[in-house]
Amino acid sequence: MEKKRVKFTFVQELIKEPVIWKLAKQYDVITNIRRADVSDDRGWVVLELEGERDEIERGLRWVEEQGVRIDPVYEDIVEG
Amino acid sequence: MNFAKNLKCKECGRVYPLDPVHVCEFCFGPLEVFYDYETLGRVLTRERIEAGPPTMWRYADLLPCRRETAVDIGTGFTPLIRANNLGRLLGLNNLFIKNDCQNPTWSFKDRVVSVAASVAREFEFDTLACASTGNLANSVSAHAARAGMKACVFIPGDLEQGKVIGSAVYNPTLVAVEGGYDDVNRLCSELGDKYPWAFVNINVRPYYAEGSKTLGYEVCEQLGWRAPDHCIAPMASGSLYTKIYKGIKELTWLGLVDWRATRMSGAQALGCSPIYEAWARGSFTIRPQKPQTIAKSLAIGNPADGYYALKVLEQTNGAAAAVTDDEVIEGIKLLAETEGIFAETAGGVVISGLRRLVQEGRVDPEEVVVAFITGAGLKTQEAVSPALAPALTIRPTIDSFEEALGERQRSPASAPIAVGGERR
């Protein structure tokens, strides 16, 4: 089992979609929300995912296909 | 002495020991170094600082490592010059330029990396790592060399040769990663989890970021122990901008300068301006962007400290500006032609951003304004070279010289004069 910390950013059209619930339902991944902020036009959720590495990867690919942006919790790492 | 006390989560306030960790275990919020300000207030005086070396390490008491073991290649205490020529042009009567081009690897990154390398050595890491498109890579490579550490530096595969040399000369393990910016980002976040390295802006980030505070300290000391009325700094991740403010605040908490309610303004390139965009919307939510600008040292589309930068903008009644790439070049030329300082593109962003804020009436002409120039122009020559007037070419005779000079004076372009032709 592995743990992965990620940040999901949702555009307005996806705010009402239960993406995280579906992720846990469709894939063998435990989702653990640590911090979130949702406004009228955008929302983000910082969470920890726990599961087999491949399963986490498959789940994240599906999340990305839904139009959710996925970042490491520390945002951009590449600096000038 | 070292007055760093612990790490504190910026979101939930949980406290952690001074370890190589960067996010809160509970809320995954970023951690920040917290000091024993009570003892510092008793111990630290202007005289104690002034007796220190003419580098950023004169402020070691306010950094999370000891001066005696610091990895110091002579960073900091760079010139603060009064910019009368540029000030007159912009309509500012008290404009100062903090010229951080004069650091050992020619950018402010030496400040943060000097702290990161020092801490990494104290934590007994043997490898210093980073992912960078330029300045950070140069500085990490240089500091690792000085510290006797290994360096592993990740760069995008399509990086220009000129930028690679500034790192390669120090002989790090230089890794060119195929793919785009996002690929490098993702790979490095995974490497950060897997390898026992000091990744300067991941696991030692809370310490690394503290180095930028020294810009705030220096400016206050160089103004005669006085806080500026208004600062304008470039914003990429937002870390530098927020830490300059933290530095000024700390000096006021410690009674070393009077509180002046310093206004903090920030500048971005329009092609990568997520902080400006959120500020203009009146929001604290960053919308990540895909960078498209010549100001590559500021090209962070999803800034780690963007939210905190927006908070500082609000708290200090500062303003944000975003400028086009043409304005970036104009800003570089303006600073060079008026004050004799050749800045990289980030400097062009700051100068044009300042000009824009003045035009919008957001800067009082009498304010003591400090513009932070964070990197030297030789690093980004390709950005500005097409906009420069070509040299005059003449035969080696006085007639030819005077003829060319006459033409030059009739032409609006101001070209430098170079003598060419065969030797007599």
Image (cartoon, rainbow, N blue to C red):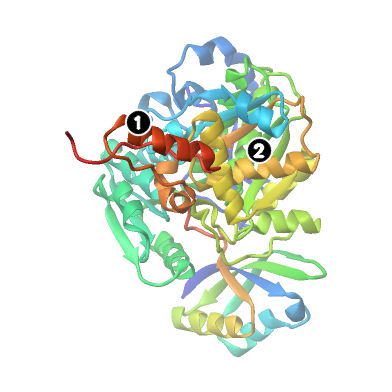
Closer to us: B31 or B246:
B246
The crowding category of the residue bearing disc 1, from other C-alpha atoms within 10 Å (few below 14, some 14 to 19, many at least 20), is some
Residue B334 x, y percent position in the rendering: 57, 38
Q: Is residue B383 above or below residue A31?
A: above
Q: Chain of mark 1?
A: B
Disc on the earlier residue, 1 or 2: 1
Residue B187 x, y percent position in the rendering: 42, 67
Q: Which mark is residue B73?
A: 1
Q: Amino acid at mark 2?
A: Ile
Q: Residue at x 41, y 48 (%)?
A: B381
Q: Residue furthest left?
A: B424
Q: Is residue A68 left or right of residue B259?
A: left
Q: Chain of mark 2?
A: B
Q: Is there any visible trace of residue B17 in the rendered image? A: no
Locate the C terminus of chain B by quadrant.
top left
Q: Quadrant of residue B57?
A: top left
Q: Which residue is mark 2?
A: B232
Closer to us: B419 or B271:
B419
Which secondary structure lies at badge 2? strand
Which secondary structure lies at badge 1? loop
Q: Is residue B10 above or below residue B73?
A: below
Q: Amino acid at mark 1?
A: Ile
Residue B323 x, y percent position in the rendering: 65, 52
Q: Residue at x 29, y 36 (%)?
A: B146
